[in-house]
Amino acid sequence: METAIWHKKLLSTLEQWIDTTGENHVFVDFTNQHLIAIYDLIPAGHKLTAAAVRDASEKYQREHSFTKVIEETGTEELEFNSYGKANAEKLNDSDTEMNSKAGKDICWQIDAELVNVGKNAGCAISLSVYEYDINRGKTTLQSHIVKYLQLGNRHSMAVDTSGIKSPTYQQNGKVTGKHHEWIDITEEVQDCEFFETNRHRIYIKVDGPGEDDRNNIGIKGTFLIPYITYKE
């Protein structure tokens, strides 16, 4: 009875914690050199013994896990272009026009993340464009796209994060004046490990002709996706 009550309290605590994470749950990669087994955190003499948790954990892994046999590692270029696919994140009196002009600032922010799409390695990227600036911007438009590699008849694929500092990237900047053209921001994103900037350029578009700029903003360039292929 005491164990059942303890389990109920544990479940309630876990549910409370999950409620604090919102809807942005993310699975992360890890290796056995970077995690502490949960049973190693149980103090000696606790009614829930480390040995019992270890045995249950190992039993679950034997019954539910699988072995990945690595076949290949590498990097592959992947072109992307999100132009014409923007959503209105914030509107100023239903106004979807950036209206870039002399003396006016338009701010932008790039968010990119290496992701696994099913059994394929890919990258998600978004461009947010702010009329004036990020903090006091009036209209905000966002263009988002997810691209993934397709490497023929290989078994399964995943992002290989072992050789990079971070699978996520963020950069922001500002342009002033009228800009209806593609703007080269390659130099500003040189530090992104999964943009190919040696032989290709990265461009953004923050405005265009007309009063509705949802079809006028976007980002284009080339990813450099680190991947592994494996069979199960």
Image (tube, helix red, strand yellow):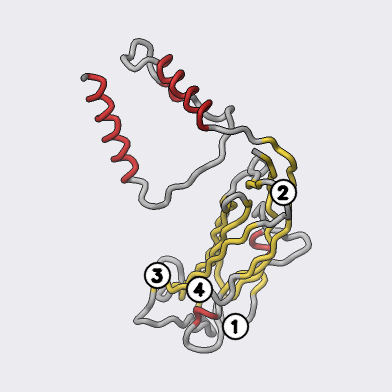
| Label ID, residue 136 | 3
Say left or right for 68 vs 215. Answer: right
Disc 2 marks which amino acid? Arg
Q: Which of marks 3 and 4 is nearer the N terminus?
A: 4
Secondary structure, mark 4, is strand
Say left or right for 44 vs 145. Answer: left
Q: What whole-number distance in Å separates the C-alpha atoms at marks 4 and 1?
A: 16 Å
| Label ID, residue 180 | 1
Disc 3 marks which amino acid? Arg
| Label ID, residue 86 | 4
Disc 4 marks which amino acid? Ala
Viewer-proximal residue, 131 or 96? Answer: 96
Q: Earlier in the sequence, mark 4 or mark 1?
A: 4
Secondary structure, mark 1, is loop
Image coordinates of residue 144 in percent, x first then y, are: 53, 66
Q: Mark 2 points at which residue?
A: 154
Secondary structure, mark 2, is loop
Secondary structure, mark 3, is loop
Q: Quick check: 96 above or below 145? A: below
**Residue at figure coordinates x 49%, y 69% from the top left:** 142
